[in-house]
Image (cartoon, rainbow, N blue to C red):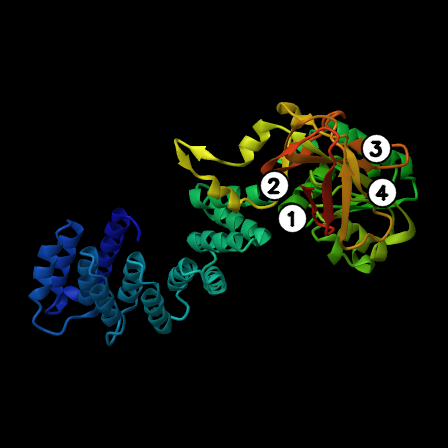
């Protein structure tokens, strides 16, 4: 149910529509308008007295007002019955039906609201406002496809209906169709630059597709310098370069500056692809770099590329290495988009893991008691996911020597799954609170970029799995580390 202020707005609209419909000229008109006035003055008893004075058959507007009165009193079944009778009344008027739908929606009777809008649309099939309201009702009911269908029709019928563009953008965002959401919000802002709902929707969509780490990545000089050194080492004036997940186009511009004959950057996020194109053009590479708004797996080499790639750049790694699907993307690109002797940056990676003691990290990731209450059951809801952690910000220590758990060669086929176990010998007593892991990226034969806690810092930092329960470790008493991957995620756990 919406706020009392919203109900007051709906009743004001209802009063205006009733007056404009000429209802005051019928015998029941004056009591209805009087009842509306009483309702707007928060006097439902007086409104009911006014309605009881109607001595002829109650019109649809009166039934809707009876529904409001009973609904405000909490008589849900009675309110629903009045709304149904109002919606199914003979000879309905378009505006009264729409406002009855709005009121039914206010009280949570979504099916009745949809029926009201159905009848309104039967009267006026091209009524964009009715489609907008029915679409919003479908949205509240959780029927995303029906909501999108109605809201899209509303924008096509009335392209300047700002509210419909905003509502459609909200539905697209809920369905994770971010490019479509961007277009809707931008259209709404073109129509109304001060529209706060459109601006808020745009900001929320940007937050979905541009995580906070994006700026940190672009400002990561260790990462940038290492990639540029590797790019310079392999790119020649004859090179055709493909940059997967080009983002802002930074690595594509490095390749072009290194002398590449032509560079293609692909980007799945529409707003990023558009911005990358502008950045490339601003930096004078408009004739040498093409930015394509597609996943690399959707590229058609005959249409999207002048020739197959001699150099493949795929900086699509997260703090746990595999979370951005580098294996699937590079495998597909090698097979369809690259020459047989393609140079890949990065060409491979080695992953290292170690049990660590850090009560502070564990305390951030799990709960025990609070104010004397046992709330530890909350930990059962925690997903088995690693978290990006800057180990330098915490007191922590290794309980064993780091172990290389996986080595990936992106120039070769990689198994879809793999499982390994390692017998570790602790070098001291302690309590294992988690397992930290990091990787070394082999960007070229001479260039390695490491996210190790002992290496120069990068925006990736380190990944940490916290253990469900701390594990006591004894010096020289072996423990076993279990490691697995499914090409998308590395999973780690400790056992005996």
Of labels 2 and 1, earlier in sequence is: 2
Front in this rendered view, residue 177 or 109: 109
Residue name at image x 66 percent, y 42 percent? 275
Of labels 4 and 1, earlier in sequence is: 1
Residue name at image x 34 percent, y 63 percent? 110
Q: Which mark is residue 210?
A: 2
Front in this rendered view, residue 472 or 106: 472
| Tag 3 residue | 448
Badge 4 vs badge 3, beta-carbon distance below 8 Å: no
Regarding mark 4 in the picture, which secondary structure is present there? loop
Regarding mark 3 in the picture, which secondary structure is present there? strand
Depicted 11 relative to depicted 23: above or below: above
Q: Quadrant of the C terminus?
A: top right
| Tag 4 residue | 347
Of labels 4 and 2, earlier in sequence is: 2
308 on left or right of 109: right
Front in this rendered view, residue 176 or 134: 176
User: Few, some or many C-alpha atoms within 10 Å of disc 2 (few <14, some 14-19, many ≥20)?
Assistant: some
Front in this rendered view, residue 132 or 86: 86
The mark lying in front, picked from 4 and 1, is 4
Distance, label 4 to label 2, CA atoms, is 26 Å
Distance, label 4 to label 3, CA atoms, is 10 Å
358 on left or right of 346: left
| Tag 1 residue | 269
User: Few, some or many C-alpha atoms within 10 Å of disc 4 (few <14, some 14-19, many ≥20)?
Assistant: many
Tell me residue 203's x, y (percent): 52, 41
Regarding mark 2 in the picture, which secondary structure is present there? loop
The mark lying in front, picked from 4 and 2, is 4
- In the image, farthest residue toward the bottom: 90
């Amino acid at each position: 149910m919406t706020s009392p202020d919203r109900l007051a707005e709906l009743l004001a609209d209802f009063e205006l529509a009733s007056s404009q419909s000429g209802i005051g000229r019928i015998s029941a008109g004056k009591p209805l308008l009087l009842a509306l006035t009483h309702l707007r003055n928060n006097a439902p008893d007086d409104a009911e007295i006014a309605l009881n004075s109607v001595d002829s058959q109650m019109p649809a507007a009166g039934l809707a007002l009876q529904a409001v009165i009973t609904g405000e009193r909490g008589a849900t079944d009675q309110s629903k019955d009045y709304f149904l009778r109002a919606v199914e009344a003979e000879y309905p008027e378009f505006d009264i039906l729409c406002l009855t739908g709005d009121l039914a929606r206010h009280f949570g009777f979504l099916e009745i609201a949809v029926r009201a809008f159905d009848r309104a649309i039967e009267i006026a099939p091209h009524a964009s406002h009715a489609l907008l309201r029915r679409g919003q009702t479908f949205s509240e009911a959780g029927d995303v496809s029906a909501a999108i269908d109605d809201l899209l029709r509303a924008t096509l019928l009335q392209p300047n209906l700002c509210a419909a563009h905003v509502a459609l953008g909200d539905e697209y965002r809920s369905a994770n169709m971010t490019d479509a959401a961007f277009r809707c919000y931008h259209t709404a802002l073109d129509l109304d630059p001060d529209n706060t709902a459109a601006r808020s929707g745009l900001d929320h969509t940007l937050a979905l597709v541009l995580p906070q780490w994006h700026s940190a990545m672009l400002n990561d000089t260790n990462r940038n310098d290492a990639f540029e050194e590797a790019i310079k080492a392999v790119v020649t004036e004859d090179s055709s370069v493909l940059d997967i997940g080009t983002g802002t186009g930074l690595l594509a511009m490095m390749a072009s500056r290194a002398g590449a004959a032509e560079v293609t950057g692909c980007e799945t996020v529409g707003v990023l692809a558009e911005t990358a194109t502008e950045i490339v053009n601003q930096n004078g590479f408009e004739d040498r770099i093409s930015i394509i708004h597609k996943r690399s797996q959707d590229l058609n080499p005959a249409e999207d590329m002048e020739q197959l790639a001699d150099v493949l750049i795929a900086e699509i790694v997260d703090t746990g290495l595999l979370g951005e699907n580098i294996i699937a993307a590079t495998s597909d690109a090698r097979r369809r988009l690259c020459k047989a002797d393609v140079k890949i940056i990065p060409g491979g990676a080695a992953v290292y893991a170690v049990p660590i003691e850090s009560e502070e990290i564990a305390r951030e990731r799990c709960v025990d008691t609070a104010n004397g209450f046992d709330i530890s059951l909350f930990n059962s809801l925690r997903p088995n996911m690693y978290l990006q952690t800057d180990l330098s910000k915490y007191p922590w220590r290794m309980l064993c020597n780091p172990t290389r758990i996986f080595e990936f060669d992106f120039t070769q086929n990689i198994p879809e799954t793999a499982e390994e176990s390692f017998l570790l010998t602790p070098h001291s007593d302690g309590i294992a609170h988690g397992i930290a892991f990091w990787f070394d990226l082999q960007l070229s034969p001479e260039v390695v970029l490491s996210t190790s806690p002992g290496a120069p810092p990068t925006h990736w930092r380190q990944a940490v799995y916290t253990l469900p329960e701390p594990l006591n470790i004894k010096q020289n008493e072996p423990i076993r580390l279990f490691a697995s991957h499914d090409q998308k995620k590395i999973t780690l756990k400790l056992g005996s």
